[in-house]
Amino acid sequence: MTCPQCGEACTRDLVDVGVGEMPSGPYGCENCGWLEPLPPDVTIVHYLNAGRALCGLAGPPNQWPDGHRWVSGRGATDEVTCQECRRRLV
């Protein structure tokens, strides 16, 4: 996918489901920070550390796109659905 803001290539996280890979998040642009809007019934949960998402999602939570929320703390890691945040929690 090409970024609608800057024209660079976009990527998205994939998760191995045993018989191939499935998308696990929206497309995003590493060049300008654009994120594909999520469907209204989808929420991506990030892990917040020192006011920032572990995955590197740009900006503080109040500037994140709709469909993104955060958790933090020892017992909250099971709620994280962002694949990059989960990878960095290990």
Image (cartoon, rainbow, N blue to C red):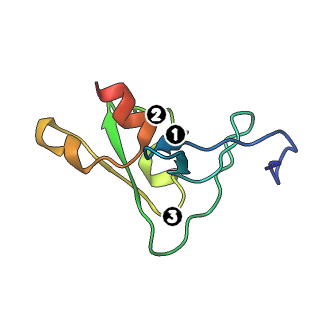
Amino acid type of disc 2?
Cys
Tell me where residue 46 appears, x and y as whole percent.
37, 45
The residue furthest right is 7
| Image: 5 above or below 41 | above
Q: Which residue is mark 1?
A: 57
For the residue labelled by badge 3, is the local secondary structure a helix, a strand or a loop?
loop
Alpha carbon of mark 3 to alpha carbon of mark 2: how far? Answer: 17 Å
Q: Which amino acid is tagged 3?
A: Asp
The residue depicted at 74 percent of the width and 33 percent of the height is 31
Residue 36 is situated, as x and y percent measured from the top left of the image, at 65, 57
User: Residue 69 falls in which quadrant of the image?
Assistant: bottom left
Could you say which disc has been placed on residue 55 in the image? Answer: 2
Query: Do tag 2 and tag 1 residues touch (Cβ < 8 Å)?
Result: yes
Residue shown at the point (35%, 36%) measured from the top left:
86
Amino acid type, callout 1: Leu
Marks 3 and 2, the one that precedes in the sequence: 2
Residue placed under numbered mark 3 in the picture: 66
Cα gap from disc 3 to disc 1, whole angstroms: 13 Å
Residue 88 image offset from top left, x and y in percent: 37, 26
The answer to which of marks 3 and 1 sits earlier in the sequence is: 1
Element class at badge 2: loop
Check the image and report above or below for 1 versus 73: below
Query: The C terminus is located in which quarter?
Result: top left
Q: Residues within 10 Å of mark 1 (few under 14, many from 20)?
A: many
Q: Residue 59: x, y in percent?
A: 52, 41
Residue 52 showing in the rendered view: no
> In the image shown, does 12 or 37 lie closer to the viewer?
12
In the shown orientation, is residue 48 left or right of residue 58?
A: left
